[in-house]
């Protein structure tokens, strides 16, 4: 007998789930001693353990030393390609393992009769779901942001979330891209689905139902093998599929449904591959599955340990196997780990206890149990169910868990399963330890999905073991009774609570869900080129509408506003929903997006027309305003735009009948004048006056109301002798506040220095260091530097240019409303470093490297 077979027989004997006679009964301590002795640890294993710890330590040190700004930049630039690589590895793993699957599939599948039972169960769940649960979001901010991430992956192949953008001819042009700390796997799935269906919210809402069905099939297959009973597996599947929270989220766009699907796939694959037959080929499928699994929720990276312990005998045979497995899992999970670095220390929820504390953990644990044991209904809504979990199921779960613990402690049963389960539960403890574990907040009730498969398994196994142990009946008879009880309870409770499902139980008080559904239908009738100003612009993007936040809209200058009025045909709308009333209450522990102040400022600053108000549906007035014009600004100025086209062509547009006269100059040299009588006219600039590199056209126009409007239009003529710095890849950066922005200020506004706008450049903040590797052959670096007008409270900052580590130029100390032109010789320089150094403090030091470009003389 081989060493592997010998160890396998020992473990099977020690950890068997067969009924033991009194003579065979073992204590927990004896079972643990037998299990440890079966490991047969020696010197090679010590080396393996040391190397494994070293791999984890190196990964932790990399993670712990990542700057927030670098982690966020990496996520946006490489997040998509990272998960795409994992997907390619998954496909390769499937192909490589097809022969193994084909050879062993027949012996793995349960009987046809049990499949018929599963099919009937799935049909019942599906009919009930489509008949009683609306297809809508349950958790608005997260779910619509993942859809926006999918759009960004599909259109731009980047890894962030499009926060603000414009739809043009069915293509999303993202204006502001930000990070998110979870859901990348779901966003990637959306990007794949968008290749075959419309890229929008309605398509995304269709994705979870097939995941739900596939997860129940995989769960049934895995437990049929592990339990040795398809009836007991069917009981657990009934418990899982009938859980209220799972049924609801299966008709939503929650990443937790994909989480359960991937987990059950892993369970089925692990059940399919016996511990004594596993080879490296099987891990070609295991590793990418774990990679996708880790990118459903950020805490899931802590759950990889049981997936290594399951095949511990395989890893013990060669000292390199476990370190290689750990390194591979870290590599495919890196986007999730990286995002944890980007959101290190996040604390966006308040409450009684601090985030990242054991007080928070115990608070969440206690309140969750109390909520799950709640029998109450809401009489004011017709007795609607308020519990995210059937109370009957909770009682069965608690009793079954206690029973199985007694069986383990007294009889030494299920020791290995307990060990694997505890390590799997690390992610659950991390969730509750951090910030977002309590079910008293409706948006958090979906977090129970990370534990639902384990709950269903414990319920079925605990009932079966207690029944079989106490009555000594045949195992098949006990399994039949548990299966019948599970199906009757599950289906009966679903039917009994059907009115609650139809009334969107658990989420009926979340008015934002009704607001989102209402806007999705209402705004479909607005002109296609409309632009919406809304507190959650990513939601609008997922619905196919162009959208910006209130804060961004506040920062629009008169000419930017005129541009968007021109592009939208005068269809700019401000939507005031729930976030537009009241203040954020951090003690409530709920994420807040209140935008009351911004909306009030906009309504005070702009002439507007109320086009819709609905105060009945939501408990607050949902209002839509059409923005007419800026107050205190010439009507003509904000309806006149100048846009630069190719080859020195300038297009002038006006949205009024009167004629206007404009003088124009190019690069500070007067060129002539033009009388604009048509709604649109084209001006061709003198090509001899257009230079390589940066060009600026200045228009001074006399309006019919005797007002004078000045408009700057910058354009860059790129060649092998001139290149924009913003067109080069930033190798690395460090910044004390925010992230550097390309062609925008650090707060995503137009670069503006002392009232003068700039089209190109880098928006940064003190203290910062922006590093570039330069192409060869350039001799000069040009820029206009200063503190952006968006923040006037800074105490001054210095702008420093370093080449290959040597200081080449340093500005004077620049305060708000000051700017300085830099022309720096960089001949032979390969590494350019641009620094903004604070004065006495960094507050408000929004430093701009405007019109920064490289020139070869």
Image (tube, rainbow, N blue to C red):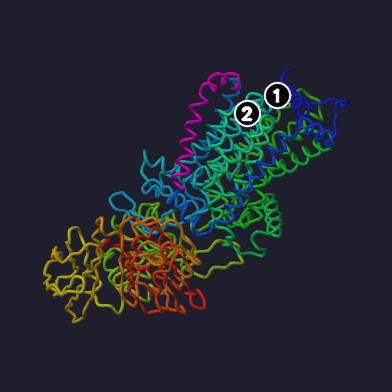
Image coordinates of residue 523 in percent, x first then y, are: 35, 56
Where is the C terminus found, in terms of image quarters?
bottom left
Q: Position of residue 657 (x, y in %)?
A: 14, 70
Q: Quadrant of residue 830?
A: bottom left
The image quadrant where one finds the N terminus is top right
Q: Is residue 93 magenta?
A: yes
Looking at the image, do the residues carrying marks 1 and 2 touch, with CB atoms under 8 Å apart? no
Q: Can residue 399 be seen at all in this image of the molecule?
A: yes
Name which residue lies at 62% across and 41% down: 304
The one nearer the camera, 570 or 35, is 35
Rendered residue at 41%/59% (across/down): 831
Residue extending farthest to the front is 828
User: Which mark, by number, is residue 4?
Assistant: 1
Residue 109 appears left or right of 144: right
Q: Position of residue 330 (x, y in %)?
A: 57, 43
Q: Nearer the viewer, residue 634 or 79?
A: 79
Whichever of labels 1 and 2 marks the residue nearer the N terminus, that label is 1
**Dot 1: element:** helix
The residue at 29%/59% (across/down) is 723
Closer to the eye: label 1 or 2: 1
For residue 271, the mark is 2
Along the line of sight, which residue is nearer the eye, 3 or 711?
A: 3
- Tell me the quarter of the picture where residue 560 sits: bottom left
Main SS of the magenta segment? helix
**First to last magenta residue range:** 79-108
């Amino acid at each position: 007998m081989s060493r592997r077979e010998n160890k396998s027989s020992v473990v099977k004997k020690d950890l068997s789930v067969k009924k033991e006679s009194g003579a065979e009964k073992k204590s927990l301590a004896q079972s643990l001693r037998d299990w440890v002795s079966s490991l047969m640890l020696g010197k090679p294993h010590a080396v393996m353990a040391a190397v494994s710890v070293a791999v984890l330590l190196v990964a932790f040190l990399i993670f712990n030393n990542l700057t927030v700004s670098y982690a966020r930049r990496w996520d946006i630039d490489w997040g998509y390609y990272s998960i795409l690589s994992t997907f390619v590895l998954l496909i390769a793993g499937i192909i490589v393992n097809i022969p193994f699957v084909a050879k062993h599939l027949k012996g793995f599948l349960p009987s046809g009769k049990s499949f018929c039972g599963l099919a009937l169960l799935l049909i019942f769940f599906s009919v009930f779901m489509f008949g009683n649960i609306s297809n809508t979001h349950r958790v608005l901010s997260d779910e619509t942001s993942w859809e926006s991430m999918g759009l960004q992956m599909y259109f731009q192949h980047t890894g962030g979330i499009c926060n603000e953008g414009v739809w043009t001819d069915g293509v999303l042009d993202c204006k502001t891209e930000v990070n998110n700390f979870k859901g990348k796997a779901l966003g990637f799935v959306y990007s794949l689905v968008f290749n075959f269906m419309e890229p929008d919210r309605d398509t995304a809402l269709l994705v979870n139902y097939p995941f739900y069905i596939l997860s129940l099939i995989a769960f049934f297959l895995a437990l049929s093998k592990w339990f040795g009973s398809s009836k007991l597996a069917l009981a657990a599947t009934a418990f899982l599929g009938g859980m209220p929270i799972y049924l609801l989220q299966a008709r939503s766009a929650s990443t937790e449904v994909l989480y359960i699907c991937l987990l059950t796939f892993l369970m089925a694959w692990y059940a399919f591959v016996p511990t004594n037959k596993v080879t490296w080929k099987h891990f070609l499928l295991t590793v990418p599955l774990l990679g996708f699994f880790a990118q459903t929720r950020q805490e899931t990276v802590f759950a990889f340990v049981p997936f290594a312990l399951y095949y511990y005998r395989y890893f013990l045979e060669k000292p390199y196997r476990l370190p290689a497995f750990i390194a591979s899992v870290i590599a495919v999970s890196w986007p999730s780990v990286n995002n944890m670095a980007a959101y290190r220390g996040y604390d966006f929820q308040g409450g009684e206890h601090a985030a990242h504390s054991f007080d928070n953990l115990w608070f969440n644990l206690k309140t969750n149990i109390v909520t799950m044991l709640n029998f109450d209904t809401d009489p004011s809504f017709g007795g609607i169910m308020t519990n995210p979990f059937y109370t009957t199921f909770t009682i069965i779960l608690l009793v079954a868990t206690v029973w199985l613990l007694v069986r383990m402690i007294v009889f030494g049963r299920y020791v290995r399963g307990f060990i694997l389960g505890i390590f799997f539960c690390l992610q659950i403890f991390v969730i509750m330890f951090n910030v977002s574990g309590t079910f008293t907040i409706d948006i958090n009730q979906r977090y129970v999905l990370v534990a639902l498969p384990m709950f269903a398994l414990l319920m079925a196994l605990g009932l079966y073991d207690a029944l079989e142990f106490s009555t000594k009946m045949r195992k098949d008879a006990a399994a039949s009774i548990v299966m019948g009880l599970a199906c009757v309870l599950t289906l009966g409770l679903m039917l009994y609570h059907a009115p609650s499902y139809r009334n969107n139980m658990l989420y009926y008080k979340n008015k934002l869900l009704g607001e989102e559904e209402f806007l999705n239908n209402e705004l479909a009738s607005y002109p296609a080129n409309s632009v919406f100003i809304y507190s959650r612009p990513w939601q609008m993007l997922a619905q196919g509408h162009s959208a910006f936040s209130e804060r961004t809209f506040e920062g629009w200058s008169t000419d930017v506003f005129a541009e968007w009025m021109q592009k939208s045909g005068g269809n700019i709308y401000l939507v005031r929903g729930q976030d537009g009333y009241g203040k954020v209450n951090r003690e409530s522990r709920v994420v807040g997006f209140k935008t009351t102040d911004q909306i009030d400022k906009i309504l005070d600053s702009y002439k507007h027309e109320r086009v819709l108000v609905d105060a009945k549906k939501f408990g607050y007035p949902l209002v839509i305003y059409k923005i007419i014009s800026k107050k205190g600004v010439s009507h003509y100025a904000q309806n006149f735009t100048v846009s630069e086209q190719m080859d020195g062509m300038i297009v002038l547009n006006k949205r009024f009948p009167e004629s206007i006269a404009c003088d124009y100059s190019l690069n500070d040299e007067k060129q002539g004048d033009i009388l604009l009588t048509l709604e649109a006219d084209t001006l061709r600039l003198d090509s001899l006056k257009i230079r390589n590199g940066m060009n600026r056209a200045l228009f001074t126009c006399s309006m019919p109301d005797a007002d004078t409007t000045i408009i700057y239009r910058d354009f860059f003529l790129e060649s092998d002798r001139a290149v924009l710095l913003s067109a080069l890849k930033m190798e690395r950066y460090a910044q004390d506040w925010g992230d550097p922005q390309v062609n925008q200020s650090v707060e995503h506004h137009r670069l503006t220095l002392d009232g003068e706008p700039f089209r190109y450049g880098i928006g940064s903040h003190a203290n910062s260091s922006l590093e570039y590797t330069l192409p060869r052959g350039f001799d000069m670096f040009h820029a206009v530097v200063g503190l952006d007008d968006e923040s006037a409270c800074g105490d001054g900052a210095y702008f420093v240019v370093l080449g290959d580590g040597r200081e080449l130029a340093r500005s004077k100390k620049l305060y708000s409303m000051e700017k300085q032109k830099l022309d720096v010789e960089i001949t032979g320089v390969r590494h350019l470093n641009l620094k903004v150094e604070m004065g006495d403090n960094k507050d408000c030091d929004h430093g701009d490297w405007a019109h920064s470009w490289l020139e070869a003389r």
